[in-house]
Amino acid sequence: MILAERNEMITVNKLNKFFGDLHVLKDIDFNVKESEVVVLIGASGSGKSTMLRCLNFLELKNSGEIIIRGENVNPKRDNLNQVRQKVGMVFQHFNLFPHKTVLENVTEAPIQVKKMAKASAIKEGKDLLEKVGLADKENDFPSRLSGGQKQRVAIARALAMKPEIMLFDEPTSALDPELVGEVLQTMKDLAYEGMTMVVVTHEMGFAKEVADRVVYMHDGKIVETGHPKEVFDNPKEERTQRFLSSIL
Ligand code: ADP
Ligand code: MG
């Protein structure tokens, strides 16, 4: 389907976020369409994590609109747990439950939050572990896994809630270089299946191969957005050029 005809999954209008006096997100306008993969780049402190956390309502905005699949979310009125089920998130530091097995990590939220029957949750959890290549690890504890395996469990755990959008916040930054590829591959598989994704990453190879759009943030604002080829090969803004030469 042509991009212009797809549903908007996320629409952000004039989003502002402050931490005390610190103005972290400044009048952000942003949208993501169905099955689109958007890669968010920018220097440390530019507001990328805060942006993702606002999209998942882990942080609450100060002003502006956040519309998820046509629903203008009002944190005071709406059930944020329900909204969060639509928007899965994967963090840099995995955040697995250390005292639960791999399979229990994946089935915990469907059973506890969605009240799914245990047997169905286990069946779906095993399918998800198979999908991320960890079927043989279901009874292991996270401490037995490599960083790349932990992150793939974290992805399976997020998928277990059947989200319609997945947010990734530097999912490979904490990994040894040789483990980055397996996590990126899992994310690529997800993208090719049509998942709508917003990914904060400095993995430019991933962005070039998978992203429909790259968004560059600087100091709480979106400075440039475009197809990865345009942004990487021919950035319009000087700040984007400087940032790209600093990371390549
Ligand atoms: P990035 O992910 O691009 O590195 P962040 O969104 O983490 O940027 O941070 C943006 C700015 O907001 C930084 O100046 C950071 O120190 C500040 N910040 C982030 N989270 C908090 C918080 N919970 N309380 C106060 N300041 C914060
Ligand atoms: Mg961050």
Image (spheres, helix red, strand yellow):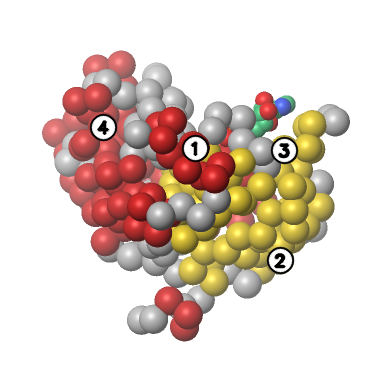
Which residue lies at the image location 39% right of the left edge and 19% below the top edge? 99
Ligand 1 within 8 Å of disc 3? The answer is yes
Kindly identify which residue carries mark 3: 24
Q: Earlier in the sequence, mark 1 or mark 4?
A: 4
Kindly identify which residue carries mark 2: 72
In the displayed orientation, state which residue is furthest to the right: 21
Q: Earlier in the sequence, mark 4 or mark 3?
A: 3
x then y, percent, for residue 62: 81, 46
Q: Earlier in the sequence, mark 1 or mark 3?
A: 3
Quadrant of the rendering where the C terminus is positioned: top left
Q: Earlier in the sequence, mark 2 or mark 1?
A: 2
Q: Quadrant of residue 136?
A: top left
Q: Earlier in the sequence, mark 2 or mark 3?
A: 3
Kindly identify which residue carries mark 1: 242
Kindly identify which residue carries mark 4: 180
Query: Which label lies toward us, 2 or 1?
Result: 1
Q: Earlier in the sequence, mark 2 or mark 4?
A: 2
Between residue 198 and residue 69, name the one nearer to us.
198
Which residue lies at the image location 52% right of the left edge and 64% below the top edge? 32
x then y, percent, for residue 113: 53, 46
Q: Badge 3: how crowded within 10 Å, few (<14), some, or many (20+)?
A: many
Task: Tell me the CA gap for discs 4 and 3.
Answer: 29 Å
Q: Which amino acid, mark 2? A: Asn
Residue 145 visible in rendering? no
